[in-house]
Image (spheres, rainbow, N blue to C red):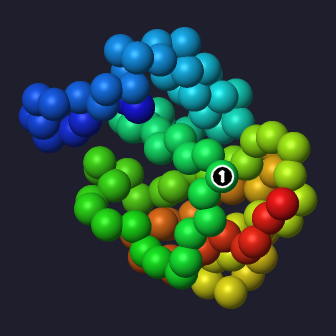
Amino acid sequence: VGAMPGGINKQPKANSMFPELVEAAFALERKLRPNREPSSTIAINRNAQFRPHTDSGAGAGQSTSLIVGLGTYSGGELVVEGAKHDIRYKGLEFNGWTQRHWTMPFV
């Protein structure tokens, strides 16, 4: 969700399909990190488990990723460069474009 950078005309379909979700996602970012430069886009994943990777693209001009886990689950920690982080209802910033990261299994 959000505004695609660099003059990309095609915007995410979720903006028009789920306007309340778009508003809530950016409000959550402001609440978690009030002094952070606002993101242009936010990825929303559900029941997603990722293998070790670095993010592709230029990060829409940002070098710092912000992630938070929401919901009722156990496990699912984010591992960044080998360090495990509990992100359930806790925001974590890291450089997703240079630091390898992945999610641990969850239920």
Nearer-the-camera pick, 72 or 59: 72
Nearer-the-camera pick, 46 or 92: 46
Secondary element under disc 1, as helix, strand or loop, is loop
Residue at image coords 50%, 66%? 95
Residue at image coords 87%, 44%? 72
Residue 70 picture location, percent across and down: 76, 42
Location of residue 78 (image quadrant): bottom right
Residue at image coords 27%, 59%? 58
Residue 29 picture location, percent across and down: 61, 33
Residue 96 picture location, percent across and down: 48, 66
- Please tell me whether residue 99 is drawn above or below residue 2 in the rendered image: below
The residue that label 1 is drawn on is 47
Q: Is residue 34 visible?
A: no
Location of residue 54 (image quadrant): bottom left
Say whether residue 32 is left or right of residue 97. Answer: right
Label 1: how many residues lie within 10 Å, few (<14), some (14-19) or many (20+)? few
Say whether residue 28 is left or right of residue 73. Answer: left
What amino acid type is highlighted by mark number 1? Answer: Asn
- Please tell me whether residue 66 is drawn above or below residue 50 in the rendered image: above
Residue at image coords 55%, 21%? 21
Say whether residue 7 is left or right of residue 38. Answer: left
Which image quarter is the C terminus in? bottom right
Residue 63 picture location, percent across and down: 41, 59
Nearer-the-camera pick, 17 or 23: 17
- Please tell me whether residue 60 is drawn above or below residue 39 in the rendered image: below
Which image quarter is the N terminus in? top left
